Image (spheres, rainbow, N blue to C red):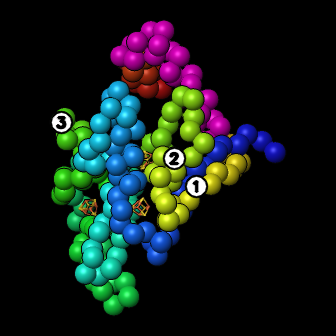
């Protein structure tokens, strides 16, 4: 077996979620500086969609940042109940308030609770009493292309550290003109 990477996965069982929002509070406390010095769900990288009338509670973890709203959107119907567009999207998007750092407006993304020393499992999973969130890891073989890309990035980073990124970019631009 060649090189492997760890794939981290949080399983969400929406039937078990009761909308308690403990995950939001724990995530925000973990990401407050200094750690655990405050709780503000607006800083959380997880947002629980709570709709008591439709009896639905869905935790959504923050995904990638998008600079502009997308043109094609999804409207879900679940058990005959229709949900607004965007509601289950993971993006930090200009169309809505959450998944943005409240003071700076900078986008927030779930980091699976990167920490040193590492956590045994992400905090939102730890605090989820009804086990709506569960965690698992698996090792996956890395393709040759990914290995090469990784080596290239490490090489470029060490060159950029030594010579500065601008000089590296200028050199690459000069070389590509000659090619
Ligand atoms: S802690 Fe668990 S049950 Fe509570 S809102 Fe979050 S996912 Fe749902
Ligand atoms: S929230 Fe998601 S679906 Fe809605 S506009 Fe933004 S990126 Fe598109
Ligand atoms: S995995 Fe960690 S960073 Fe991501 S939503 Fe859960 S508590 Fe927040």
Residue that numbered label 1 is attached to: 135
Specify whether tag 2 is near ligand 3 (CB below 8 Å).
yes
Examine the rendering and report whether any part of residue 66 can be seen.
Answer: no
The correct choice, above or below, for 72 with respect to 129 in the image is below
Answer with left or right where residue 124 lies relative to residue 170.
Answer: right
Task: Kindly indicate the quadrant of the structure image that contains residue 17.
Answer: bottom left
| Residue 109 highlighted magenta (yes or no) | no
Q: Which mark is residue 122?
A: 2
Between the C-alphas of marks 1 and 3, the distance is 31 Å
Where residue 60 appears, x then y in whole percent? 38, 60
Q: Which mark is residue 103?
A: 3
Residue sitting at x 50%, y 65%: 130
Question: Which residues, given as a range, are shown in magenta?
Answer: 145-167
Within 10 Å of disc 1 (Cα), the crowding (few <14, some 14-19, many 20+) is: some
The correct choice, above or below, for 168 with respect to 45 in the image is above
- What quarter of the picture does the N terminus occupy? top right
Examine the rendering and report whether any part of residue 10 can be seen.
Answer: yes
Residue sitting at x 30%, y 86%: 81
Between the C-alphas of marks 3 and 2, the distance is 25 Å
**Labelled pair 1, 2 in contact (Cβ < 8 Å):** yes
Between the C-alphas of marks 1 and 2, the distance is 8 Å
Q: Which callout, 1 or 2, points at the residue further toward the start of the chain?
A: 2
Task: Kindly indicate the quadrant of the structure image that contains residue 19.
Answer: bottom left
Answer with left or right where residue 20 lies relative to residue 10.
Answer: left
Where residue 68 appears, x then y in whole percent? 21, 52
Residue that lies at the very extreme toward the right in this rendered image? 1
Residue sitting at x 57%, y 46%: 121
Where residue 179 appears, x then y in whole percent? 48, 26
């Amino acid at each position: 077996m060649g090189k492997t990477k760890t794939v981290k996965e949080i399983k969400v069982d929406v039937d078990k979620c009761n909308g308690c929002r403990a995950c939001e509070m724990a995530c925000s406390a973990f990401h407050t500086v200094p750690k655990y010095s405050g709780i503000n769900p607006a800083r959380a990288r997880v947002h629980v969609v709570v709709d008591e009338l439709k009896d639905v509670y869905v935790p959504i973890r923050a995904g990638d940042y998008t600079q502009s709203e997308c043109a094609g959107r999804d409207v879900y119907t679940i058990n005959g109940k229709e949900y607004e567009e965007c509601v289950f999207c993971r993006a930090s998007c200009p169309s809505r308030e959450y998944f943005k750092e409240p003071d700076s407006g900078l986008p927030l993304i779930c980091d699976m609770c990167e920490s040193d020393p590492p956590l045994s499992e992400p905090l939102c999973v730890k605090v989820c009493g009804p086990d709506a969130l569960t965690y698992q890891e698996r090792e996956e073989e890395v393709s040759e292309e990914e290995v090469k890309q990784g080596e290239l990035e490490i090489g470029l980073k060490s060159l950029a550290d030594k010579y500065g990124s601008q000089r590296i970019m200028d050199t690459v631009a000069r070389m590509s003109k000659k090619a």
